[in-house]
Image (cartoon, helix red, strand yellow):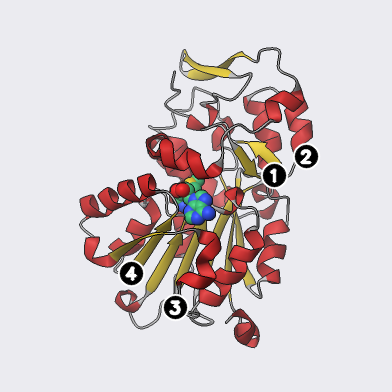
């Protein structure tokens, strides 16, 4: 059964069942599975987004899904290249999913290439672009992000998005290095959004009341994501920054995305109070002391002029 206001809690993973009950998600059954059993990963990343893409699309319609996308886009907008007019800018959305963010860029007049390894996701992204009336601004590309270096010439893009994709890759650093080389110049921007390890500790403890998983997540490299029950890479504090620096990128901003929203009591309506929650989250995500425990970490990086040659 779906919990409409918090799809992150729609756990159908081994040993867990959640239900929507009296306005809140509640854990009904944790079963007898051991911690090890509960941490096992049953769904491969390459199949979950292919055979059940609509589940992810539905998640993005929930207040929690919207909040993640809206906050990440608001952070990105602060750093979009101003240049000679957005109509000449080119963007690449790696692992574009349903195209929700790419279409926002297209609406600004930016030409966007939407790349995803899932044809089902690309079908949804195509509809998103059609409904938004921006098909002339977008190109759909069925490809694997790990092949990025072979797909585009160096210095091709002014904006590259890598939102919630690195979590599913075996070598996220290699993709970041390829992305850095695909940035056009020192005004081009790379936006990366990943799952924050510290946020998984809070989520397990506060949402699920599972202290064993919470403690495990303090050091876990992988966790089990809620939507499909598959494994997802966790990024410890500063690890994303370190990866970006290793890719010869300068980190110009780090933000937390969804600090408190996942833990608000049922008396706060995620829908009716959406704008207030969004504004509060914007403030929290900008402060390192709160951002450090957010569900997601967003870094914005650039090739600084002194290392531009290294990037390309
Ligand atoms: C969690 S979704 C994120 C979608 C979108 N970026 C967003 O922020 O809503 C992950 C997406 O990455 C895609 N993906 C996973 N591994 C990939 C790979 N190796 N190459 C390209 N896309 C990949 C999936 O198909 C899925 O659409």
Residue 132, image x, y percentages: 23, 53
> Which quadrant of the figure contains the N terminus?
top left
**Are the residues tagged 2 and 1 within 8 Å (C-beta)?**
yes
- Element carrying mark 1: helix
Q: Classify mark 3 as within 8 Å of ligand 1 or not, answering yes or no.
A: no
Residue at the image point whose x is 64% and y is 24% from the top:
208
Q: Classify mark 4 as within 8 Å of ligand 1 or not, answering yes or no.
A: no
C-alpha span from label 2 to label 1: 7 Å
Q: Classify mark 1 as within 8 Å of ligand 1 or not, answering yes or no.
A: no
Q: Quadrant of residue 129?
A: bottom left
Left or right: 40 in relation to 218? left
Residue at the image point whose x is 35% and y is 83% from the top:
84
Residue 197, image x, y percentages: 69, 44
Residue 28, image x, y percentages: 58, 12
- The residue at which mark 2 appears reads as 218
> Which quadrant of the figure contains the C terminus?
bottom right
**Are the residues tagged 4 and 3 within 8 Å (C-beta)?**
no
Q: Which of marks 1 and 2 precedes in the sequence?
A: 1
Q: Residues within 10 Å of mark 2 (few under 14, many from 20)?
A: some
C-alpha span from label 2 to label 4: 40 Å
C-alpha span from label 4 to label 3: 13 Å
- The residue at which mark 4 appears reads as 110
* Foreground of the two, 247 or 64: 247
């Amino acid at each position: 059964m779906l919990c409409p206001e918090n799809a992150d809690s729609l756990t159908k993973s081994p040993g867990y069942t959640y239900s929507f009950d009296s306005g809140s998600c509640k854990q009904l059954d944790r079963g007898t599975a051991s911690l090890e059993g509960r941490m096992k990963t049953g769904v491969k990343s390459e199949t979950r987004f292919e055979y059940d893409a609509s589940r992810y699309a539905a998640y993005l319609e929930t207040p929690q899904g919207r909040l993640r996308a809206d906050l990440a886009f608001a952070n990105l907008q602060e750093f979009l290249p101003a240049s000679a007019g957005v109509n000449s800018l080119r963007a690449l959305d790696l692992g574009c999913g349903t195209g929700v963010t790419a279409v926002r860029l297209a609406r600004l007049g930016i030409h966007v290439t939407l790349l995803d390894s899932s044809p089902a996701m690309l079908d949804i992204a195509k509809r998103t672009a059609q409904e938004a009336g921006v098909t002339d601004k977008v190109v759909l590309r069925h490809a694997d992000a790990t092949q990025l270096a072979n797909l585009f010439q160096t210095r091709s893009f002014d904006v590259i998005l890598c939102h919630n994709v690195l979590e599913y890759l075996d070598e996220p650093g290699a993709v970041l290095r390829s992305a850095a080389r695909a940035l056009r110049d020192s005004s081009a921007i790379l936006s990366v959004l990943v799952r924050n390890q510290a946020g998984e500790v809070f989520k397990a403890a506060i949402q699920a009341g599972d202290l064993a998983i919470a403690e495990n997540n303090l050091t876990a490299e992988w966790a089990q994501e809620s939507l499909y029950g598959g494994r997802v890479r966790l990024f410890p504090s500063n690890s994303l920054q370190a990866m970006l620096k290793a890719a010869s990128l300068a980190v110009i901003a780090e933000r937390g995305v969804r600090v408190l929203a996942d833990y608000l009591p049922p008396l706060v309506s995620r829908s009716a109070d959406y704008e207030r929650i969004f504004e509060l989250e914007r403030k929290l995500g900008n402060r390192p002391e709160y951002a450090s425990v957010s569900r997601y970490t967003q870094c914005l990086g650039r090739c600084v002029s002194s290392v531009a040659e290294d990037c390309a």
